[in-house]
Amino acid sequence: MLVKILTGLALAAVALFAILEAPFLWVAPVAAVVFLIAQDEFIRLPGRQVKRVERLVAALAGAGILAAAALIPLEVVGGTVVGYGFVFQGIATAFATGVVAILLAVLFTPHPIEQAGGRASHAIAGLAYVGLLSAVALLILRDEHHQAGRYVVLLAGVVTWGNDTMAYFGGKTFGRHKMYPAISPNKTWEGSVSGMIGSVGGALIIGAWLLPAIGLASLVGFALVGGALGQVGDLAESLFKRTWGAKDSGNLLPGHGGFLDRIDAFLFVAPLAWFWFFWLFPFAG
């Protein structure tokens, strides 16, 4: 438990500094490496049947998606982002190229043939699941969104990890009724409700501290929808881990498993944050 807490505090400190203070040209490559490791962890879940060639091809395709999200110029008028057309074209091109490249890699190394289709499908799923969803976080962090983008990413992270932390302790303390035992045997409805309280509480703190321009209804609404969506994201990763008999996605983070275990919920919340605060309920950052 102590190792888990210390690792969590260290990760939180690094993430807080990177989001609030680090230049984009520093934080983007570091975030990209984390996302690519998480993508590779997902692709390696089936174990030995996964071949290095599809891992390599998927990693290159994921890097292309993230590079497009981070580097292709946005359409800016008067200091405000008005369009994402070129970026989305670049992301779509990188993803489509990656799909074709993965299929070619499996076609050239098909044996054992009984596993070939599953290998290809799993690698493509990892590219879509981790590669595409994580690209949105880099997109929000870009300097064209000014500090508002940094604050929105931090808000999404606090809603996510506040939920995860409170759900863990709430479930340990009050958990009685299983939520979805077929997918995640330890999750309870009491933990889920505790997690939602953590999401709303964290959102209120970040809103008062950094985002006073966001209305209370929008802030709480995002926390509730984001908290619920984050729990779905956590269950989604658990589904794949249960399918392949894995307890964690990796072992790089003491007490926390792999990087995908830490960002599985965030991957679902980041796209919601971009849509919520830049399209549905825009605010003056």
Image: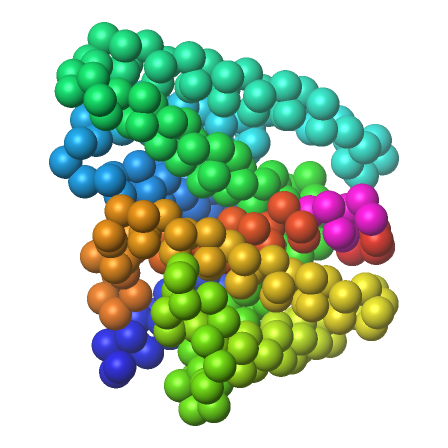
Q: Work out whether 214 lies above or below 237.
A: below
Foreground pick, 28 / 134: 134
Q: Work out whether 57 lies above or below 32.
A: above
Q: Which region of the structure is painted magenta?
A: 274-280
Residue 222 in which image quadrant: bottom right
- Residue at point 36% right, 40% down? 39
Residue 248 is situated, as x and y percent measured from the top left of the image, at: 27, 57
Residue 23 is situated, as x and y percent measured from the top left of the image, at: 51, 47
Foreground pick, 262 / 214: 262
- Residue at point 63% right, 46% down? 271
Residue 255 in which image quadrant: bottom left
Q: Is residue 31 left or right of residue 272?
A: left
Q: Quadrant of the N terminus?
A: bottom left
Residue 121 is situated, as x and y percent measured from the top left of the image, at: 38, 27
Q: Work out whether 120 lies above or below 249.
A: above
Foreground pick, 232 / 131: 232
- Residue at point 49% right, 71% down? 179
Q: Quadrant of the C terminus?
A: bottom right
View extreme (bottom): residue: 173
Q: Is residue 143 left or right of residue 218?
A: left
Residue 33 in which image quadrant: top left
Q: Is residue 250 visible?
A: no
- Residue at point 19% right, 13% down? 109
Residue 29 is situated, as x and y percent measured from the top left of the image, at: 41, 39
Q: Is residue 254 visible?
A: yes
Indicate the colouring scheme. Answer: rainbow
Does the magenta run of residues contain 261?
no
Which is the main secondary structure of the residues drawn in magenta?
helix
